[in-house]
Amino acid sequence: MPEFKTLLVEQIGKVAHIQINRPEKINAMSRAFWEEMIQVFTWVDDTPEVRCAVISGAGKHFSAGIDLQMLAEAAAGMDPDIGRKAETIRRNVLQLQQSFNVIDRCRKPVIAAIHGYCIGGAIDLISACDMRYSTEDAHFSIKEIDMGMAADVGTLQRLPRIIGDGMMREMAYTGRAVYGPEAARIGLVNRTWPDYEQLLAGVLELAQQIASKSPLAIRGTKEMIRFSRDHSVEDGLNYIATWNAAMLQSDDLKAAVMAHMSKQTPEFAD
């Protein structure tokens, strides 16, 4: 397992628990964080023994979003020519987007466990996850509007498919805070827990349940959901037919059927 400056990574059975680990900075996302997210999810994707991942935050908060010091340093190093400056900013934004695209594209399900602040870039992060759960006092805000900018790392593209277009626009245009109970009501999170300890225990239990399923079936399900999000129903149906033409020949199907018939719990190869 690789080592990181801004992340704590622990493998619990078949589940990788990834903690954002800058509690003294409210888990603000430094330059190292953006680089390490790509590294850690490359590891998750490439490690057969990991079947599901959980992202949480160390300390009192999930994350306050992008580290403003990083933005200040980037601005100080800009070329004075307006065209070159624009190209540099564009390339920087695309690189930041890649740090959360790896979550969306990861073959394994990724679950966010959110407590305290989840602001700005942290909304971009959780929007790329498969599922989101939070404490009742969790604080969600698309804060970029109050910084005089539009969110540019995935929130505006992914969140409408999670909470609906109108609610996303309300949050994005106003920057207002949404707390745990409302987040559950609008579908931003699937469920809330009273405190962080219960949240993490509940989410890890769910992750272990997912990890007990056929890894091929889970990967196929996530791939189909992602594909259908961006394609027509007809395209999605055609793709799943082609996919299952190969995947239904797996030993996982036989193991699942035999276990069901004998009322036992199936065991699947990584």
Image: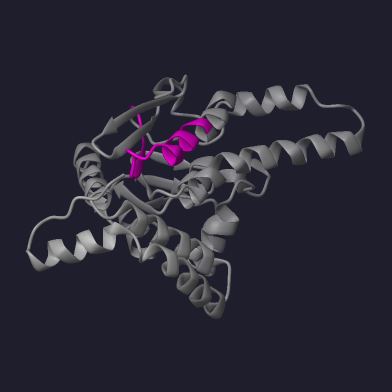
- Residue 249 place in picture, x, y as percent: 35, 64
Viewer-side residue, 236 vs 176: 236
In this rendering, does residue 227 appear at all? yes
In this rendering, does residue 64 appear at all? no
Q: Is residue 265 left or right of residue 216?
A: left
The figure's colour scheme reads: one colour
- Residue 149 place in picture, x, y as percent: 68, 46
Residue at figure coordinates x 63%, y 25% from the top left: 70
Viewer-side residue, 24 vs 44: 44
- Residue 187 place in picture, x, y as percent: 38, 62
Residue at figure coordinates x 36%, y 42% from the top left: 53
- Residue 216 place in picture, x, y as percent: 36, 55
Residue at figure coordinates x 51%, y 50% from the top left: 105
Viewer-side residue, 234 vs 252: 252
The mark tally for this picture is 0
Q: Looking at the rendering, in which quadrant would you find the C terminus?
A: top left
Placement of 97 over or under 188, stated as above or below:
above
The segment highlighted magenta reads 39-59
Q: Looking at the rendering, in which quadrant would you find the N terminus?
A: top left
Q: In the image as oriented, which residue stretches furthest toward the bottom?
A: 234
Placement of 111 over or under 72, stated as above or below:
below
Instruction: Identify the image quadrant of residue 16.
Output: top left
Q: Is residue 109 magenta?
A: no
Q: In the image as oriented, which residue stretches furthest toward the left?
A: 263
Viewer-side residue, 158 vs 167: 158
